[in-house]
Image (cartoon, rainbow, N blue to C red):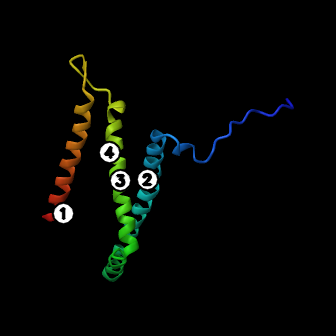
Amino acid sequence: MSKRKPYTRELPTDWWMKQLFYTKYMIREGSSVFITIYSLILAWGVLRLSQGEVAFNAWMTSLQSPVAIIVHLIALGLALYHTVTWFSLAPKAVDLWIKGKRLDDKVIVSGHYAALAAATVFCLLVIML
């Protein structure tokens, strides 16, 4: 064993705030915390639904509090941010070639947005009918 200390690079806790690229990355990755909380809220609603109408109505009433509305708005905003950033990364993950030519990045991104719009319309139609 060597008596020398191994080199350890010091990294300040705010390293990710010094460059915009890293800040956006950390916000996108940190959004998973709020999405997890939101998923747990929905799972709690399914549990309350299984317990009967009174329990489910109490859960629905709790969602009308200002804190719950703020949590939902934060989760929505972060989910939309995550969606936009993920769609912009899609051309790097999807390498499509058609007739020997690489598909343009704009086509891939717009295809994702079109699929999102179609899925949203479909879900709204199912809910409304």
First of labels 4, 3 by sequence position: 3
The numbered disc on residue 127 is: 1
Ranked by sequence position, the earlier of labels 4 and 2 is 2
| The disc label shown at residue 79, or none | 3
Instruction: First in sequence, mark 4 or 1: give its number.
Output: 4
Tell me which amino acid carries mark 2.
Answer: Ser
Q: Tag 4: residue type?
A: Val
Are there few (<14), some (14-19), or many (20+) residues within 10 Å of tag 3? some
Among numbered discs 1 and 2, the one appearing first in the sequence:
2
Q: Distance between the residues labelled 4 and 3?
A: 9 Å
**Mark 4 vs mark 1: in front:** 4
Residue 31 is labelled as 2
Q: Are marks 4 and 3 in contact (CB under 8 Å)?
A: no
Work out which residue is located at the far top of the displayed protein and give it. 100
Q: Label 1 sits on what residue type?
A: Ile
Label 1: few (<14), some (14–19) or many (≥20) C-alpha neighbours in 10 Å: few
The quarter of the displayed image where residue 36 is located: bottom left
Q: Say which quarter of the image contains residue 77.
A: bottom left
Q: Are marks 2 and 3 in contact (CB under 8 Å)?
A: yes
In percent of width and height, residue 25 lies at 45, 43
Please state which of residues 55 and 76 is positioned toward the viewer in this rendering.
76
Q: Is the residue under label 2 in contact with that under label 4 (CB below 8 Å)?
A: no
Residue farthest to the front, as pictured? 18
Q: Distance between the residues labelled 3 and 1?
A: 21 Å
Callout 2 environment at 10 Å: few (<14), some (14 to 19), or many (20+)?
A: some
Q: Quadrant of the N terminus?
A: top right
Q: SS class of the residue under badge 2?
A: helix
Which image quadrant: the C terminus? bottom left
Q: Is residue 42 above or below residue 31?
A: below
Secondary structure at badge 3 equals: helix
Residue 103 at x, y percent in the picture: 24, 25
Q: What element carries label 1?
A: helix
